[in-house]
Amino acid sequence: MNYAECLAYLAELGNEIRGVKFGLEAIETILASLGHPEREYPTAIVAGTNGKGSTSAILASILEEAGRRTGLYTSPHLVRVNERIRVNSREIPDEDFATCFTEVRQAVERLLAQKSLAQRPSFFEYLTAAAFLHFARAGADFAVLEVGMGGRLDATNVTEPRVAVITNVDLDHMEFLGPTRAAIAYEKAGVIKPRRPVVSSCEHPEAAEVVRRRASELDAELLEMSGFAQLSNVRSAQGRYVFDLALNGDRFSGLASPLAGEFQMKNAAAAVTAAWRLAEQGFNIPRGAIVEGLRTATWPGRLEVVRERPLVVLDGAHNPAAAREVAAFAREQWAGRRLRLVYASMRDKPMGEISEILFPLADEVYLTRPELARAASPEEILAAARYQPPRIVVEPDPVRALEAACRARSPDDVVLACGSLFLVGALLGAVKSGE
């Protein structure tokens, strides 16, 4: 199969949510038939409701700065599927993607013919197997894996990670993971392995207790950020934080988070703690690599500035917890400035609750819809909204909605586009293509 044929085949499988299925049997069977490429390098795994992508990217940047050839597997992608699979910050080339994906598909067809697989794998399982294979072929000597959903039965959870990170636990994907924070925490805590360290940023008491209990059952060293890590000398420069971090007597001064928002400082601290713990295990990760790897880390679509005048910011906040973080940032950084909000959502998200958080920030709300079956129409968003802003503009095309918000402005206004990573992807694609 060539690259275009691989993309067409993936499209036939449907998106991760429509085709989601939990269980490790299929991915383990596929990887065994490929010779277990996931066993050829040590791994770290990152789970959590929000912040796991940022944390994964920062940890991978630190490892790369330390001289390790580092694989990074994340989801979803914003513009191209290749974004999900990187080695030393470089997206998998189209030709390599086609080669690895074709090998995975051929293995799947053999296993289906042998009745070793009960059903065809999901979109996510195909990509996860291709990622493990690419990392092995590319000579990765460490891989950072972002969990897709949950953790316990997620396809990424097939290795024995040298460190696990749980960024936070909040209410999202409740139809799959459970109706309470405790139930969701149980799924996230599935990434904890016997006698392997786990870094936890869980703040909700109910979720934190579930993580503590699971770590104790597995005799896993638990490093809770709330008690183990001491942040001090915190200062903000235009929403990007610089801070000192003390870890069991070791002190890092002047750590600079490259990503905007106080919540990103917490993700940065968790990634630094994970890297510090890997160094304690004997991995050669100098202190300078931790500082520089953090400083140079990048992660698109999270309070990302794509234009200065007017200020245009994109963020993938798609659940209430993420929306609250974005709202806090907006009130802190843009107080007194007129804000126009471009908003889209998937139909399965709590649009009513999110509208109460985000819509009061804005003088005008532009409702739009990415080209995706799961996406809610502007009319569905309006019907679900619990807060009515002063002015609503309906523009189904995301790029035209952003253009309209930018036109109706004074130079000091802020245009914030958020509510879905698929909206961010559509707009970033337009930015990169010059639309």
Image (cartoon, rainbow, N blue to C red):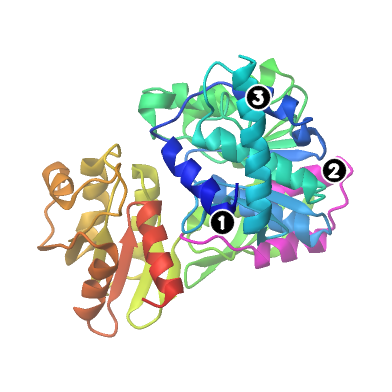
Mark 1 secondary-structure assignment: helix
Nearest to N terminus: mark 2 or mark 1:
1
Mark 3 secondary-structure assignment: helix
Q: Point out the stretch of residues depicted in magenta.
A: 272-301
Q: Quadrant of the C terminus?
A: bottom left
Q: Amino acid at mark 2?
A: Glu
- Is residue 276 shown above or below 426? above
Towards the viewer: 356 or 4: 4
Mark 2 crowdedness (10 Å alpha carbons): few <14, some 14-19, many ≥20: few
- Tag count: 3
Relative to 54, 253 lies left or right: right
State the residue at coordinates (35%, 63%): 330
- Is residue 145 visible in this depiction of the protein? no
Q: Amino acid at mark 1?
A: Met
State the residue at coordinates (51%, 57%): 80
Relative to 95, 411 lies left or right: left
Towards the viewer: 370 or 250: 370
Image coords of residue 207 (percent x, y): 49, 28
Mark 1 crowdedness (10 Å alpha carbons): few <14, some 14-19, many ≥20: many
State the residue at coordinates (77%, 30%): 36
Image coords of residue 203 (percent x, y): 50, 37
* Residue marked by disc 1: 265
Q: Amino acid at mark 3?
A: Arg
Towards the viewer: 423 or 177: 423
Q: Quadrant of residue 397?
A: bottom left
- Is residue 298 visible in this depiction of the protein? yes
* Residue marked by disc 3: 110
* Residue marked by disc 2: 280
Nearest to N terminus: mark 2 or mark 3:
3
Nearest to N terminus: mark 1 or mark 3:
3
Image coords of residue 196 (percent x, y): 76, 29
* Tag 1–tag 3 contact (CB < 8 Å): no
